[in-house]
Image: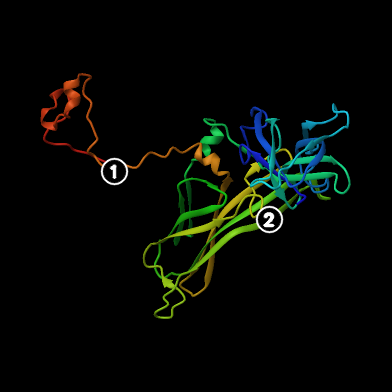
Amino acid sequence: MFYVRTSILPDSSCVVLRGTPSEASSQTLTGRVLFRLGHSLKVKRITVAFQTTGSSKQQLQSRTASSQVQMEQVLFEASSHSNGYTVWKSNCYGRDSSRYEFPFTFVIAGHMHESVNTSFGNVCYELKVNIQTCGFGINTWSESLRLPVFRIPKEGTPHALRLTDPLRMQADWLGAVELQVLRDTVSVADNSKMRALVVIRPLQKGLQLTDVGLRLSETVCHKTATDRFGDPHSHHKVISERLKAIGDSINGLSSLPLSQEHSMTLSLPIPKAFSGVQYTMDTPRISIVHELVLTATVIGRDQTPHYLRISSHVRIVPKLALEDNFTELPPYYSASFDRLLLGSSEEQLDQPPSFSSLPPSYGFAASTCNISLA
């Protein structure tokens, strides 16, 4: 059977640039290309390229620089042979077809634009292999693999530390109702669930709560493209939303009296990057911001509905950015392995001393221990 099967096997599924374009260092992209043959071929030349995809109209362009990238590496060249080609033999009768393998290495510059896919254009990268052969029929075989380029803050920088800041959103409406949203961090990874604690606290009597909603929106601003008024083009869309009706289904009530505090945990599904959502970024060409909005419908004493809303910016980042800032400690199972180390002698390490045997210099009595929480 006549076929050529090409597999592009990079050592990593993405290219990670750490830091801003001015401070990020170059990264090395390594991998290998594997060929499986179902028939002998006369091979002239094999190349692998790291390049942008799509036409120039689809790519996100700047007025001063182009986003096109083209880096090519020759894996095999048969020009030194007298026939101008080399015969790759195939053992198609064996258990496995013949395989040919070539490694490759690319140096990715630190100032390269990260991947993005918006309605204004895109910046996408791929690894593409071309095989040139001799003979009749198909003389060029191609295979490509999408490879995203991420940019995450450099560890220890203020930008990286801000990713771990907690989210505290709070406001009150005319001193009657207080709305609050709590999250561990302002950052959330794509292809995950965003959970938030929502608190509705009444400050006056006689109010009713109808529904509570949570919405995540995305605004893309193209800085290098302006309208006739000189304002940059922008596009706004809702990424995910959830509306929770507050009512008593047993008694058939569409609302509940706000006689006490209501708290609930709402979650929003975050889609995968480049398909349903983009990463939060701010570059000379484009800026992408994400906003988390809490909505609530409250019925006043005169039975008039009031639509309340508070919002705050959040960040959609690659999962790797959050893994760099959090350290997962091993689970604590038992205290049987705990030791109180008071010295370096082996006698003291054999058996941990009891609290009654501690010297008085430790500043507290052995029989009592008082803990106060401010």
Give the structural element (helix, strand or loop) at label 1.
Answer: loop
Q: Is residue 119 visible?
A: yes
Residue 236 tag number: 2
From the viewer's perspective, is residue 54 above or below residue 297?
Answer: above
Q: Residue furthest front?
A: 93
Q: Is residue 278 left or right of residue 203?
A: right
Between residue 329 and residue 40, name the one nearer to us. Answer: 40
| Nearest-to-viewer mark from 2 and 1 | 1
Q: CA distance from mark 2 to mark 1?
A: 48 Å
Q: Which residue type does callout 2 highlight? A: His
Colour mode?
A: rainbow
Q: Is residue 94 left or right of residue 134?
A: left
Q: Is residue 22 left or right of residue 245?
A: right
Q: Which residue type does callout 1 highlight? A: Tyr
Residue shown at 61% from the left, 38% from the top: 12
- Whether the residues at callouts 2 and 1 have beta carbons within 8 Å, the answer is no
Between residue 268 and residue 237, name the one nearer to us. Answer: 268
Residue shown at 48% from the left, 45% from the top: 185
Residue matched to label 1: 333
